[in-house]
Image: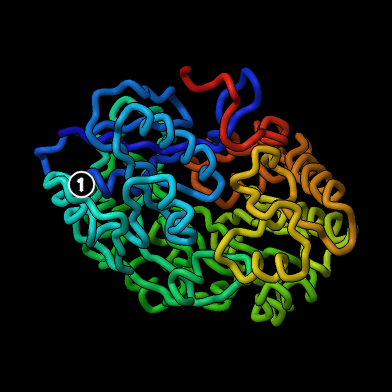
Amino acid sequence: MKITFILPAIGKKQGEKYIGTWKMEPLTIAVLKALTPNEFETELYDDRIELINYETDTDLVVITVETYTARRSYLIAEEFKKRGKPVVMGGYHVTLLPDEAAMQADAIIIGNAEKVWGRLLEDFKSGCMKKKYIGEVAYSNVLPDKSIFKGKKYLPVSLVETGRGCCHSCEFCAISGYYNCKYYKRDHSCIISDIEQNAHKYYFFVDDNLVADKNNARELFAKVEPLKIKWAGQGTLSMAKDAELLKGMKRSGCELILIGFESLEEESLRQMNKSWNIVLKERDELVKRIHDAGIGIYATFVFGYDGDTARTFHDTVEFAKKHKFYTAAFNHLLPFPGTALYERLKAEDRLLYDKWWLDGNYKYGELAFKPKNMPHEELSRLCRLSRKEFSSLPTVLSRGLSSMKRSSPLMWSLFWAMNLRLGEEIDEKMNVPIGRNLDELPK
């Protein structure tokens, strides 16, 4: 029997490729591949980099669904079902909106798949596959089988999962809701084995908050240090208060950490339930400590909360330029289903789309709600201008020189690859319709 895995893209403009910036390995599919018995033949179509063969001779189609890719996922499923192929869907969007997804698939997996994947396949072989399978917040000791990526042109960065969930409860975050604001660490022996099976020089530790459990993080860094790798991950600014933690991170090979600053406005931080961030009045000093430790920062900011004005954009860009961040994201707020933010905006009658992720009129880069202090078109425009300013050549050169002083030579090429095309990619992404064009799929 044969299983076809599909990773959907977001969408595309007429005559252009699908959005696929920073084409990382789809780690979830490698885990499912590892959990799949050898009696099943497997194949992968990554919609970001190749055309899907809807005529492939397969027995089961498995689609991983994110909210941004939900509309296209459902359209892809429709094409396979027209050809009599059963479809299974999973992923965070399916977990957030299982009833919606269940209307599009023969079976869905809610939650993490490790504990139920084998049972689903046994049921499928027996002809009695259930409509829903409920996963658990659990890890499997199996290592991802990345042989399924053979022939795919992904970035030379190996993804290694180190933990799931986060102890914070930000209003806009769907992850914290699923994991009930808890952090679940992965067994260190599995992490080390996972690292050792990869051949790349660079690693990204997949973890919503790598330093959520600082004692666990220290122990992990000590075990990673002998491997002599270079890695990036996600953390919080508060980690800079622990000098020994920073030293351990750097010794273990940390070159870059993604930090969600989210906003410089106290009212906005309070509204997004990041009031714990407000006390960080020493923000500049903490940034300096991380940089002094030789670790670059990928800073992320979000605009659209009620405390944000046009001045907020200017101040945020200046803050990012002053600290010469490795790179930065200036994103507009997006109400994801299953979040407190979505429910609040819906109750306030501020949603522009009831379900933006399914609306054919919604385009990537647009707002899906009405901001308080400016028209939604203006906020989208200011986000774009902020990205363009931060990615201007003089700013990139200044940031690049600073980055080269604190990072290893292995990271220099990555910096220029990430930043020199940043301005171009901003324009490429704007106003891309999610889903597909009418003439894209085979008739």
Residue at x-position 9% and y-position 38%: 39
Q: Nearer the viewer, residue 146 or 47?
A: 47
Residue at x-position 37% and y-position 51%: 90
Q: Is residue 114 visible?
A: yes
* The quarter of the displayed image where residue 426 is located: top right
Relative to 306, does residue 6 appear above or below in the rendering?
above
Residue 397, horizontal then vertical, whole percent: 71, 38
Which residue bears the numbered disc 1? 34
Identify the element where label 1 is drawn.
Answer: helix
Residue 372, horizontal then vertical, whole percent: 86, 64
Q: Nearer the viewer, residue 251 or 70?
A: 70
Q: Nearer the viewer, residue 391 or 370?
A: 370
- Kind of residue at disc 1: Ala
Relative to 40, does residue 382 appear above or below in the rendering?
below
In this view, which residue lies farthest toward the left? Answer: 39
* The quarter of the displayed image where residue 415 is located: top right
Residue at x-position 28% and y-position 59%: 191
